[in-house]
Image (cartoon, rainbow, N blue to C red):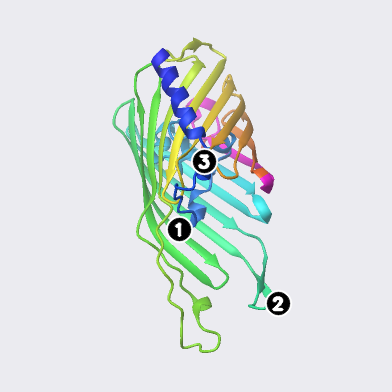
Amino acid sequence: MRKITFILIIVSSVFAQQYRVIPNIVTKVGSAAAPFLKLETGIKEIGMSGAQVASNGGISSLPYNPASIGFVDNQEMFFNKTNYLAGISHNVFGYAKKINPTDVFGFHMFYLDSGEMDKRDNTGEKTGTFNVYDLAIRASYVKIFTDRLKVGFTFKYFREDIDNMYLQGIAADVGSNFNTGIYGFVLGMSVSNFGPDVRFKGEGLKDSDDPDYQYDTDSFPLPMIFRLGLQNDVMGPSDSSFFKSDYHRVSFEIDGIKPIDFIVTGCIGIEYSWKEMAFARIGTHLGHDTAGMSLGLGLNYKGIQFDYALVQYSDLGSTGQFGIKLNLDPNQYGGVFIN
């Protein structure tokens, strides 16, 4: 126990360092395309500052780790709507189904709308308006090898439209969830957004003075992300918990995150549950430029779960986000079920 506590303290201290203020560190900010693929989704997950790679979050945690849908008992569906920063909004829908004791399939769709923005020419004169639209569609599969090991894969299609230009591409995610059997600690790992470089195309690249001429754009890599996390139910009814309780559960997770276009960051999240019906969550981002502390609440009634999260983004303000998740398991909740 002392060794584990010491390791967690050291890892937290490392992640908390503000490396970006050191001039010799090259962060590669802005060097990757399709940055919307890095946005945190899932209201429970956002309430814990995205500390989810080792969790059993189900379909809403799929973007963090494909293996998360390996915890779906029967069927699970969720939807969330986010009023993001600066008039930006995005919506997420997901569905997962366990087809047999060892195989789970999932579908996840993300759509973002920037809202209307002014278009201006080289002199600064307004010439109209435009929107930015982002779309990501994921299809996932998880293999449950044992009750302690799950491995998941995601194939995704994505597209970004900016006025009359666009980029599109394909990418893959891979992740695993492993119960170490040591004091109930669970180890999660994932690599996201692995795929070929992409470039912008479209009518907007044509020269206004000579329509037969079109500008050629450079290709840019995708925002690949490596995540590694450790999770533990420090209180709960399971045999692996440090403190036993039939009514209360406290889950703790710490994640390390390394994007291809930024330094190593981290996040810590804690969730308290009363009878798996009422939830309170708190988390914090470590080493992040803007995102700070997050808070979340949840209420689960017969498999219908309502979640709310509030995140502070420094000078950019805060966002309030709402979501609904359905656990479609008739054996667990007696009625919330779709054939």
The boundaries of the magenta stretch are 315-336
Q: Earlier in the sequence, mark 2 or mark 3?
A: 3
**Which residue is painted at 35% across and 59% down in the image?**
196
Q: Which residue is mark 2?
A: 125
In the image, is 293 to the left or to the right of 37? right
Front in this rendered view, residue 77 or 265: 265
Q: Where 102 falls versus 95 (above or below)? A: above
Label 2 CA crowd tier, 10 Å (few <14, some 14–19, many 20+):
few
**Which residue is painted at 65% across and 72% down in the image?**
119
Pick the quarter of the image with the N terminus. top left
Q: Amino acid at mark 3?
A: Met
Q: Which residue is mark 3?
A: 77
Q: Earlier in the sequence, mark 1 or mark 2?
A: 1
Front in this rendered view, residue 260 or 60: 260
Residue 285 % position (x, y): 55, 36
**What is the number of the mark on residue 48?**
none
Front in this rendered view, residue 287 or 105: 287
Label 1 CA crowd tier, 10 Å (few <14, some 14–19, many 20+):
some
- Does residue 212 appear anywhere in the picture? yes
Q: Amino acid at mark 1?
A: Ser
Q: Of the residues tagged 1 and 3, which is closer to the observer?
A: 1
**Which residue is painted at 47% across and 35% down in the image?**
58
Q: Secondary structure at mark 2?
A: loop
Front in this rendered view, residue 94 or 182: 182
State if disc 2 and disc 1 touch (CB < 8 Å).
Answer: no
- Residue most extreme to the front: 23
Q: Earlier in the sequence, mark 1 or mark 3?
A: 1
Residue 194 % position (x, y): 36, 52
Q: Which residue is mark 1?
A: 31
